[in-house]
Amino acid sequence: MNINRPCGTFDRNYFQAKELYRTPLRKTLLVLLIIGMYLLPFLTGDYGISILTLICAFTIGMLGLQIITGYCGQISIGHAAFMGVGMYTVGILQRHFGISFWMCLPLAGLVPMFIGMMFGLPALRMKGLYLAFATLAAHFVIVYVISNWRSVTNGTDGMWMKRPDALFGIDFKTDRNYYFLVLSITILMTYLATNLARTKLGRSFVAVRDNDIAAEVMGINIAYTKILAFGIGCFFAGIAGALGGAYYEYVNVEWFGLDDSIWYLGFLVVGGFGSIFGAIAGATVWKVMDEFSTLVTPIAETFLGGAAFYASAAFSLIFYSLIIIVFLVYEPRGIAHRWEIIKRSYRLHPFPY
């Protein structure tokens, strides 16, 4: 019996077994959540829309890292660089070839996917810390190429990007309409990632993560699985980067530093490894705490005076570090695990066992 379902809920046919949500309550809550996400921009100002847009974009990137690390167990410290590749793919195609954003968006995922699969080759021979260093090298290679290939990328000066052209009479130049677009793509990518985890390939990812030798004995092609995990994860990263860069209508190599890749891994721990909900929770906590650290700076000036000017740059680092440490000590399996405990308690209520 599946402990994630209420008592008395069984699969009676193949179509029921394929459903993501079996109970009417879960389906209703999911619909209400989606409707609420579409209504939020009408309740918040431009500042709130900005935060919501970035949360959606970062969620897509976190889903990609979840596929690579959370599901397949391959540590990647170059994830932010692949988001940058997605940004610059759109910027280069728009600047040099005049291609519309709608045509650039799929390529923003495919180009990082191809590059990610090439850099994923070391995963066939490396594990753990050694693989992390290989992906670290990938980050610096990508940043070096973008910074020095000035004729194409404009170097460290950055590039201007254009938002999508109007579609079906909807003008995406406004922040609210653009948020609706990013949210819709985020829902689609979340659905794809959720279903990927339930497929034969997704189960192969988990098998390789848990024990690659046992997985190979069972007939799983280890090389194919690892490289494909890097490719799919980098595809998500490229889409996230393209959407984030188009929101600001500008992209710069400084936007995807090594620290961003490290924080991606850190907040994936906060959200929870091996869970789609964990990726969403990790990205949400990251961006909310990022804004919180910005808002707390004026309060710190009251107590620190002029010293707050020098200390403000460290506030976000302190907050990030404390959150990750707290979760590593008290909830190492992340928010997703705690949410599962809460749901299980609700299903078993009022019985304590």
Image: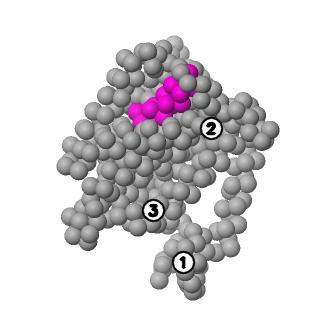
Q: Is residue 87 magenta?
A: yes
Circle 3: is it few (<14), some (14-19), or many (20+) Cα within 10 Å?
A: some
| SS for dot 1 | helix
CA gap between label 2 and label 3 equals: 27 Å
The image quadrant of residue 115 is top left
In the displayed structure, does residue 263 sit left or right of residue 128? right
Circle 1: is it few (<14), some (14-19), or many (20+) Cα within 10 Å?
A: few
Point 42% across, 39% down: residue = 112
| SS for dot 3 | helix
Could you tell me the amino acid type at mark 2? Trp
Point 50% across, 37% down: residue = 108
Magenta segment: 81-95
Q: Which residue is mark 3?
A: 197
Q: Position of residue 236 (x, y in %)?
A: 48, 45
Q: Which residue is mark 2?
A: 102
Does residue 97 appear in the picture of this structure? yes
Q: Position of residue 284 (x, y in %)?
A: 55, 45
